[in-house]
Image (cartoon, helix red, strand yellow):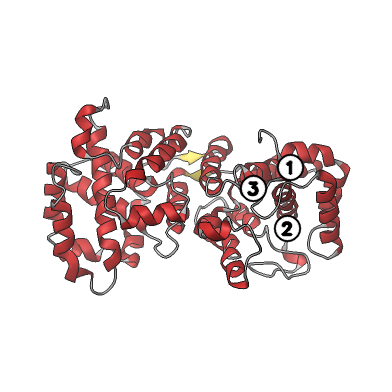
Amino acid sequence: MSVDVDLRQAVYALSDALDLVGVNDFHHGKRVALMAVEMARAMGMGEAQQGEMLDTGLLHDCGVSSTTVHQQLVHQMDWAGARGHCEAGHALLQGFPHLAHLAPAVLYHHTHWRGFPRLEVGPDIPRKANLVFLADRGDALVAPHYGPTLLQHKESIRDGIVAHNGSLFGPDLVEVFMELSRADAFWLILEPRHVQNFLGEMLHHGVPRRLGFPDLRQMAMLFSYVVDAKSPFTAAHSLGVARLARFLGVLDGQDEETLNKIEIAGLMHDLGKLQVPDEILDKPGPLTWEERMVMNRHSFETYQILRRIPGLEDVAAWAAYHHETLDGAGYPYRLPAGGLPRPARLLAVADVFQAMAQNRPYRGSLPPERILDSLRQRARDGKLDAAAVALVENHLDDCWQVALEGME
């Protein structure tokens, strides 16, 4: 069976990854999507347009991977630096044909309503982009109050939206929001369990769009760009790991379907790092025990994201196992050697090799011979698969080139 997944399921999983950037708030994108769909329905938009607003809401912050930037966006009603993540998200979505139609609304989703007349944009873009902006800023106003006391703050939140009527937000959109938000149910449905139920129902709307390997690879590339943009020290790391893991798979004699899955697992293996605070990921010295525990969550979070995409069960497991070791001392599952499939072992070696070949905040790039020495030692210590390390040893120069291809 070839790799084949549903686009909407993949979008939903990507929204899970993006919500990790909030660290302590895991539903921002989903709540924005919910509010955007509710407003779209009230405005008489059809099912296809509602689906578009759902996807735009889920992915509107795909240009954000920094926890610092996320905090500024959530805690400030109107932030001067917001344009950067809009442009980054626009560039990412434009590069993926199945989601390119969302790119204009993402680009302008922090544009003030009064600023649109000066812009040369299509006739539908201002309304769609501003609808998402209103839902996004509405959630920013609500964020400090989520919990049992939310309804007590309902009117002050509504006042916060009205205060920007005609400036940040279009008057017709504000009118729709104010009418919907009169009901307590509008606010209560924003609780996590109701958000999940709502989106679970929305996943079954519309005609499923299946992604074969070429399209899925492009989607995985989008995932990888988001996570690798989190730190200048991890730029293109996921791409390098994916290339090297596939190369090792070829040397190992794996079939084409397995090679495709290994490559996708490599592209998405570090999704969980979106939850790691910037100051930990970029720390120039050794991590404390507490910081290490935060870092070690990332492979578990990767699994939780990918396991929700039917058709990627193997990919989810292999990606999650990239820090497991043959002696059973790895994380997050402490699996014994017998629980680690061959592709996961190849991916683990590719991850170590590529990371050591790149600059990191605590050291520079290591030469191929030193990387090989480290891999051999890890194999002797029961950490890495010796046969996988032997593949590197027999093709060291090629592995170096594949791992750093296209990188400066």
Residue tagged 1: 255
Q: Say which residue appears at 45% left-offset and 56% top-offset.
A: 67
As rendered, which of 41 and 160 lies closer to the eye? 160
Picture quarter with the N terminus: top right
Residue tagged 2: 341
Question: In the orientation shown, which residue stands out farthest toward the bottom?
Answer: 148
Residue 186 vs residue 269: left or right?
left
Instruction: Tell me the CA gap for discs 3 and 1.
Output: 17 Å
- Which dot, 3 or 1, sits closer to the camera? 3
User: Quick check: 96 above or below 146?
Assistant: above
- Which dot, 3 or 2, sits closer to the camera? 3
Q: Say which residue appears at 67% left-offset and 42% top-offset.
A: 240
Q: Residues within 10 Å of mark 2 (few under 14, many from 20)?
A: few
Q: Say which residue appears at 22% left-offset and 51% top-offset.
A: 38
The secondary structure type at the circle numbered 2 is loop
Kindly indicate the quadrant of the structure image that contains residue 146.
bottom left
User: Quick check: 83 above or below 32?
Assistant: above
> In this rendering, does residue 331 appear at all?
yes
Residue 178 vs residue 149: left or right?
left
Percent coordinates x, y for residue 150 in the rendering: 23, 69
- Which dot, 1 or 2, sits closer to the camera? 2
Assess whether mark 2 and mark 3 are in contact (beta carbons under 8 angstroms).
Answer: no
State the mark number for residue 267.
none
Three-letter residue code for mark 2: Pro
Three-letter residue code for mark 1: Asp
Residue tagged 3: 266
Percent coordinates x, y for residue 143 in the rendering: 30, 62
The secondary structure type at the circle numbered 1 is loop
User: Quick check: 102 above or below 369?
Assistant: above
Picture quarter with the C terminus: top right
As rendered, which of 52 and 406 lies closer to the eye? 406
